[in-house]
Image (tube, grey):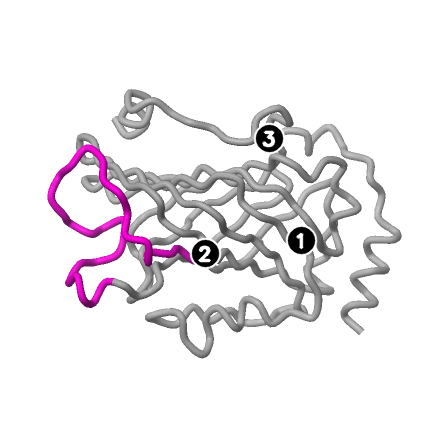
Amino acid sequence: MHRALLLAALATASVYIPAWAIDVSPLELTGHGWEDGMHVERRALPFPDDARPTVEERAAPTSRKLSAVGEVVSVQAPLVWDPGVFSLSWYVRELELVEERRVSGVRVARFSGGRFTIYVDGPYEPTEYGTHPPNETVPSTFSDGFATYLDGIFKSFELTFQEASGFGTIEAVLAFTGGTALPWIEDPESWRFDATIRRGAPMGYSFQLSRGFLDKGDPTTTARSSSWGSVKARYR
């Protein structure tokens, strides 16, 4: 039933993008992220709060992987969403830490691989973040929808975090590869995934993703890099 309603909504929606939506991100997200295990034996907290000796650069342990789940809170043209008909949740997984740096109290972690999926579920489906993921509710209650709205793979993923303020950012690039809403995206390549993160997540999570946006990036750019000066200036 829900699948039929979703397909009907997509089939009848207009692809016209109104002027007021041009400067609005097509997708806005909230959620929480965590690292998969690997920290008991090191007796250290997960990134971004693991207080290890200051070094300029180091190779990352091969076992550290980042995951995140959350809710889609806003959808703009050219995508379609009727909250009265269905809800949308998202799940990020398979991001593996390949490099971690620390400069002037700012940590920067670079991840490779990774998959991003938005799932369609019934309206008013409750979200349960719980504690200490993964568990029986996370990520299961965020990935048990009856259809896939969008599915994509990350081309780059960088997480920064300022220890003093407890705030950070995610800057990533991904390409959409599938999902019911894929036909409404004119160019599925090089979409930006930008988010603000902070402390204050439930027990067992590494951070809260307080504001996240998915928008079309420069089609000629598949990855972005920042100088250390620009990274530090972001938090002054």
Q: Nearer the viewer, residue 156 or 196?
A: 156
Where residue 178 appears, as percent x and y from the top left, is: 71, 52
The residue where tag 3 is placed is 217
Q: Nearer the viewer, residue 141 or 175?
A: 175
Q: Nearer the viewer, mark 2 or mark 3?
A: 3
The residue lying at 32 percent from left, 47 percent from top is: 198
Vertical relation: 97 (above or below) 140: above
Q: Which mark is residue 150?
A: 1
Q: Residue furthest bottom?
A: 136
| Callout 2 secondary element | strand
Q: Nearer the viewer, residue 25 or 105?
A: 105
**First to last magenta residue range:** 39-68
Q: Nearer the viewer, residue 225 or 203?
A: 225
Where residue 108 appears, as percent x and y from the top left, is: 30, 38
The residue lying at 30 percent from left, 66 percent from top is: 37
Q: Is residue 18 magenta?
A: no
Asked if residue 135 lies left or right of residue 146, the reply is: left
Mark 1 neighbour density, 10 Å: few (under 14) some (14–19) many (20 or more):
some
